[in-house]
Image: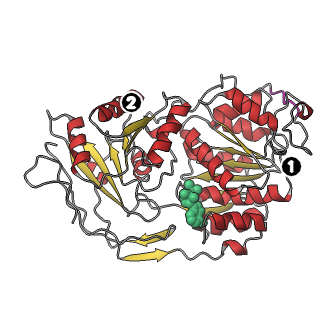
Amino acid sequence: MSTYNKPGSKRPSYSSGSKPAGSNSRFSSRTSTSGPRTASRSTSTSSTPRSSFTGSKTSFSSRPTTRPGSKPFGRSPYKSGSSRPSSNRGGRGGKKSSFERIDVSRFISKATIVEKEEIYLPTHTFADFNIDPRLKAAIAHKQYIYPSPIQDKSIPHALEGRDILGIANTGTGKTAAFLIPIINKILLNNKETAIIIAPTRELALQIEKEFNEFAVGMKMWAVSCVGGAPIFAQIKNLRRGCNLVIGTPGRLLDLVKRGEIDLSTTRNVVLDEADRMLDMGFIDDITFLLEKTANDRQTFLFSATLPKPIEVLISRFTKDPVRVIVKTRDTSKNVEQDVVRVARGIDKIDVLCELLSNSAEFKKVIIFSEMKHAVEKLSNELVKRGFKANSIHGDKRHNERQRALKAFKEDQIDILVATDVAARGLDIPDVTHVINYEIPQTYDTYVHRIGRTGRASKKGVALTFVS
Ligand code: AMP
């Protein structure tokens, strides 16, 4: 029994059933014998030479750090297509306009008693994969022992050059599922290039980080091209040459139009979280970028859902893809979900602060709010009231967002206040609580939000404020 309340106090009260047994296995799927669904939490008061991928404005010979053996890309004059201004876009619109009426009971789930655990039994080990020994060593160094289901099912096909369609969301190990085959290709031929397109800067940088961890000492390079970060630094890096560009659609489009990225010889393409990019209005940009890549490319497309426009992209830009479905359950059984009721006349911020200071269990908390200014205001108020908090949202400069994320990941702050777009796809270990300070606009957003906690078989708690 865990209690977030002292008897007699006017704090939000809550008591839960037994906790799930802890498990260290990362990619296990659990079978839950669900306890009764009861609404319980409520409150009434309360310079090494590099290789191939480069822009074209300066020739290699003018730069001492240019990678030998790589040929400069020619400027690719693009005439047709999107005429929209494309610089510095981290997302367009960013939010679904439709507001879905969600039954409050869907925010409550005590079904977290886990008695049985089904461990996924991979059919391969990493040693089985036909990959370079240096890459096997890098995988071992990252302490990946067994392939996750998506890796297990897709990597053998990807290594044979097949296109992959992965129906999977964050937390399934999809990043390594595409990075491992691509890195292996580059190890075989250092002129190989790849473009990885992701919906948000944070996700793009996370992919870059994972790539850099794998590629230590392999003399292959990635450049991140994300909106909100200085474009000239990215251009400088591109001109030095690289194998991978990882970026958000708007910025990538900008760089292609400026002739800094030539995709005509790029034979490896990854679309990560394609449905999110669609939601954010990036479909034309993606189509434009895909059209620029080489015809004999290998394409990896990951999406949690398959709306019609994504099906169209698939049929247009992939060749007989291997379909791998590794959908995590709608809402994780590891996440205990409950509502916090705020009575009329009571200030929500007071209830939140009571809740946060009432229990030591709130160790690492993400609080979601809808609007950028509301996120900023809430974060400032929490700091004023003595909490270690910071915020991420679209109005913050790229560096500020990165600083806040780093501080949160490294436990220098306990609370991160975020908008949905800014937090999309983030993989932050050990988040103990997700708090929906406002009801999300759609149930899909809710599922996405609460997926920030209860990861890697750990228990998490999701609380939604309702009035
Ligand atoms: P992703 O879905 O790619 O964001 O991955 C989720 C988390 O799982 C990341 O922290 C990865 O580093 C981790 N991960 C990916 N593959 C494996 C694996 N085979 N074994 C253990 N951890 C993994």
x then y, percent, for residue 187? 81, 58
x then y, percent, for residue 41? 21, 54
The answer to which quarter of the image holds residue 84 is top right
Q: Secondary structure at mark 1?
A: loop
Q: Is residue 17 left or right of residue 230?
A: left
The circle drawn on residue 317 is none
Q: Is residue 50 left or right of residue 382?
A: right
Mark 2: C-beta under 8 Å from nearest atom of ligand 1: no
Q: Nearer the viewer, residue 379 or 461?
A: 379
The residue at the point 46 percent across, 43 percent down is 407
The amino acid beneath tag 2 is Glu
The circle drawn on residue 191 is 1
Classify the position of the C terminus by image quarter: top left
Give the magenta part as a residue range: 74-78
The answer to if 100 sits in the magenta stretch is: no
Q: Secondary structure at mark 2?
A: helix
The residue at the point 37 percent across, 62 percent down is 459
The answer to if 76 sits in the magenta stretch is: yes
Query: Residue beneath label 2, please?
Result: 376
Q: Nearer the viewer, residue 437 or 362?
A: 362
